[in-house]
Image: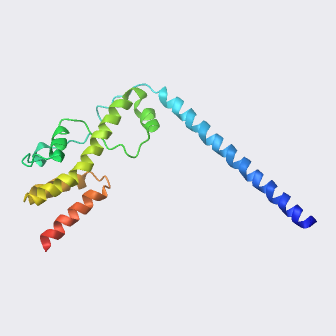
């Protein structure tokens, strides 16, 4: 009986030790985050005109289907787009200043919208008989190297359906 109580108390002590250790580590992580966020909020506005913006060419969109996806892509032609998926908002503020965050977020949203619409619209083009246009659109999407599985899958499906 004494051995059982001793083992039980020993396990409780070990459990408390690891709980305390984890809590202290978590508190440090949170403090580091807020320190970095405060530092990011104090960065002055940087020039973002030299960034490599993605541009969607009107030549890639025939404009003959009049679908919702086509209209969305046409609306993105004159808008700035950036692939910022590898950055957090804190990273963006540290690099370009907090004052640029809204504009950068809008550029990223435009990019994400385009990436989502490309394979859908390419499929619509292909189904309507615009095979070459669909391929060009998907090749443009692939050239962006964005790791969008839907673009790769649609591209593969179009080529496979042509081979059969």
Q: Residue furthest front?
A: 1
Give the image location of residue 136, x and y in percent: 14, 55
The residue closer to the viewer here, 31 or 161, is 161
Q: Residue at x 64, y 44 (%)?
A: 26
Going by the image, does 155 lie left or right of 2? left
Q: Quadrant of residue 77?
A: top left
Question: Which residue sits furthest right?
Answer: 2
How many badges with numbers are in the image? Answer: 0
Is residue 52 in sight in this rendering?
no
Instruction: Say left or right for 161 vs 17.
Output: left
Q: Residue furthest bottom?
A: 164
Instruction: Classify the position of the C terminus by image quarter.
Output: bottom left
Q: Is residue 3 visible?
A: yes
Give above or below for 27 relative to 150.
above
- Residue 2: x and y, percent? 93, 65
* Display coloring: rainbow
Q: Is residue 150 left or right of residue 163?
A: right
Residue at 43% x, 25% y is 44
Above or below — where is 53 with respect to 123?
A: above
Quadrant where the image shows the N terminus: bottom right
């Amino acid at each position: 009986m004494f051995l059982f109580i001793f083992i039980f108390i020993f396990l409780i002590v070990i459990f408390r030790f690891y709980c305390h250790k984890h809590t202290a580590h978590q508190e440090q992580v949170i403090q580091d985050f807020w320190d970095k966020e405060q530092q990011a909020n104090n960065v002055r506005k940087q020039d973002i005109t030299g960034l490599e913006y993605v541009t969607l060419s009107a030549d890639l969109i025939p404009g003959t289907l009049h679908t919702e996806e086509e209209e969305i892509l046409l609306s993105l032609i004159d808008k700035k787009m950036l692939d910022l998926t590898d950055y957090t908002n804190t990273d963006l503020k540290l690099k370009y200043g907090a004052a640029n965050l809204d504009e950068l977020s809008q550029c990223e949203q435009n990019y994400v919208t385009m990436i989502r619409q490309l394979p859908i619209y390419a499929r619509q083009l292909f189904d309507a008989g615009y095979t070459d246009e669909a391929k060009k659109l998907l090749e443009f999407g692939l050239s962006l190297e964005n790791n969008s599985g839907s673009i790769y899958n649609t591209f593969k499906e179009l080529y496979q359906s042509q081979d059969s």
